[in-house]
């Protein structure tokens, strides 16, 4: 795949990883029809190390770098946007590490391959009782929850927390209401989560974006910025897929109107050249900021607010530029790409969902711009 880098030896080896991508690609319609990623694919994610990738070696994990994980998600998203989105939640140790140390030990006591999903908003009031909280409520956007063993939900106890607190519980204590009826990323299974009168011990709650309580280089990387990156990079995979699809169409027959095939049309050649440049430039910015921040971590430091700001800006920029790349590839195909069973149709719809996520919204550009002028960003940005 042009302009594409991933060390497949980190993910079960080339043969295993490519076979998984082929399987995912062939089953895209299945995921969309049922509105979640099938459990055997989740198990394949486990086997290749998606869920232990960011777990510390002290807990049996692989301790991959942010760059390595992001490249894996990008490759998975090229096969299917929803599968890439769900695989991205292998970054969950960035959140779970904020649990108390004794709870962290329990999370990965049996295996580092723990599948965690959750819904944070809308935050729901939680009644404080001796030893913990009584949790009730409904939460939106529980992506990947159908295949999770642990689920977290956002609560707002009367404790004055500036950032959302999450209550973690076994998946069997959560009801999943299958109401994910949207334009794209349908296979993510981002259904509503419903909890009724569940007691969650205090030690099974944490502040999202809170200070990690376990040592690992990864936990010095900005967690909220990484949470945005793993979602935004799915659009890079989708954009790569869109360009590959259009370039492959050049070998097809001439148009029914008698026009030359795509690869022979001058305006298509120009648009695809511009799209390739746009994707590669956005990816370069994205991965450069990742590498700069990670190098600071490897040197024993912590990325500065300025570095974190660039990571956030690059993530938003990647999402919107890749969406434009996809739109331009779709346009040059004319009516051919308009059919629902055409690969580009799904890619376009999935990319539209990516741009709607709050992590990639215009507010992130506002925060980035404010920091360039020496102003503080809104809470939760850094």
Image (cartoon, rainbow, N blue to C red):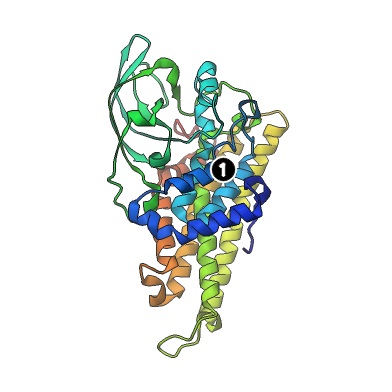
Q: Which residue is at a point 58% across and 44% down the rendered structure image?
A: 48
Q: Residue furthest right?
A: 299
Q: Which residue is at a point 54% across and 81% down the rendered structure image?
A: 266
Q: Position of residue 296 (x, y in %)?
A: 69, 34
Q: Position of residue 89 (x, y in %)?
A: 49, 40
Left or right: where 12 falls relative to 333: right
226 or 249: nearer the viewer: 249
Residue 126 in the image: above or below residue 4: above
Q: Where is residue 96 in the image (x, y as percent from the top left)?
A: 50, 28
Left or right: where 62 falls relative to 369: right
Look at the numbered disc 1 and give the secondary structure of its residue.
helix
Rendering quarter of residue 146: top left
Q: Name the residue under label 1.
A: 47
Q: Where is residue 21 in the image (x, y as percent from the top left)?
A: 54, 56
Q: Which residue is at a point 43% across and 20% down the rendered structure image?
A: 204
Left or right: where 264 falls relative to 122: right
Image quarter in which the N terminus is found: bottom right
Rendering quarter of residue 190: top left
Q: Which residue is at a point 40% across and 65% down the rendered structure image?
A: 345
Residue 48 in the image: above or below residue 255: above
197 or 227: nearer the viewer: 197
Residue 347 in the image: above or below residue 265: above
Q: Is residue 352 visible?
A: no
Q: Is residue 151 visible?
A: yes
239 or 317: nearer the viewer: 239
User: Badge 1 local density, few (<14 within 10 Å), some, or many (20+)?
Assistant: some
């Amino acid at each position: 795949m042009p302009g594409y880098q991933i060390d497949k030896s980190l993910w079960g080896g080339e043969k295993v990883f490519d076979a998984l991508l082929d399987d995912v690609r062939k089953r895209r319609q299945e995921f969309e029809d049922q509105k979640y990623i099938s459990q055997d694919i989740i198990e394949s994610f486990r086997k290749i190390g998606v869920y232990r990738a960011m777990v510390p070696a002290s807990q049996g994990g692989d301790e991959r770098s942010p760059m390595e994980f992001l490249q894996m998600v990008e490759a998975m998203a090229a096969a299917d946007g929803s599968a890439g989105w769900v695989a991205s939640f292998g970054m969950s140790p960035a959140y779970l590490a904020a649990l108390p140390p004794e709870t962290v030990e329990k999370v990965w006591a049996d295996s580092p391959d723990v599948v965690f999903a959750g819904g944070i908003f809308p935050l729901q009031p939680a009644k404080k009782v001796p030893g913990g909280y009584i949790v009730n409520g409904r939460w939106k956007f529980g992506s990947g929850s159908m295949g999770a063993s642990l689920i977290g939900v956002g609560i707002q106890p009367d404790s004055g927390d500036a950032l959302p607190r999450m209550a973690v519980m076994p998946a069997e204590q959560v009801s999943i209401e299958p109401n994910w009826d949207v334009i794209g990323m349908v296979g993510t299974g981002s259904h509503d989560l419903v909890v009724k009168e569940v007691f969650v011990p205090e030690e099974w709650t944490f502040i999202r974006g809170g200070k990690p309580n376990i040592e690992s280089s990864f936990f010095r990387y900005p967690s909220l910025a990484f949470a945005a990156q793993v979602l935004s990079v799915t659009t890079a995979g989708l954009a790569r897929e869109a360009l590959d699809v259009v370039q492959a169409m050049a070998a097809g027959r001439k148009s029914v109107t008698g026009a030359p095939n795509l690869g022979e049309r001058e305006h298509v050649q120009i648009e695809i050249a511009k799209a390739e440049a746009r994707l590669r430039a956005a990816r370069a910015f994205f991965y450069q900021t990742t590498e700069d921040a990670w190098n600071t971590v490897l040197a024993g430091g912590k990325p500065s607010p300025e570095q974190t700001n660039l990571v956030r800006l690059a993530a938003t920029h990647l999402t919107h530029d890749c969406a434009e790349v996809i739109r331009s590839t779709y346009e040059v195909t004319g009516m051919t790409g308009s059919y629902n069973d055409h690969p580009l149709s799904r890619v376009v719809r999935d990319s539209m969902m990516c741009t709607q996520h709050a992590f990639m919204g215009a507010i992130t550009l506002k925060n980035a711009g404010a920091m360039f002028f020496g102003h503080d960003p809104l809470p939760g940005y850094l």
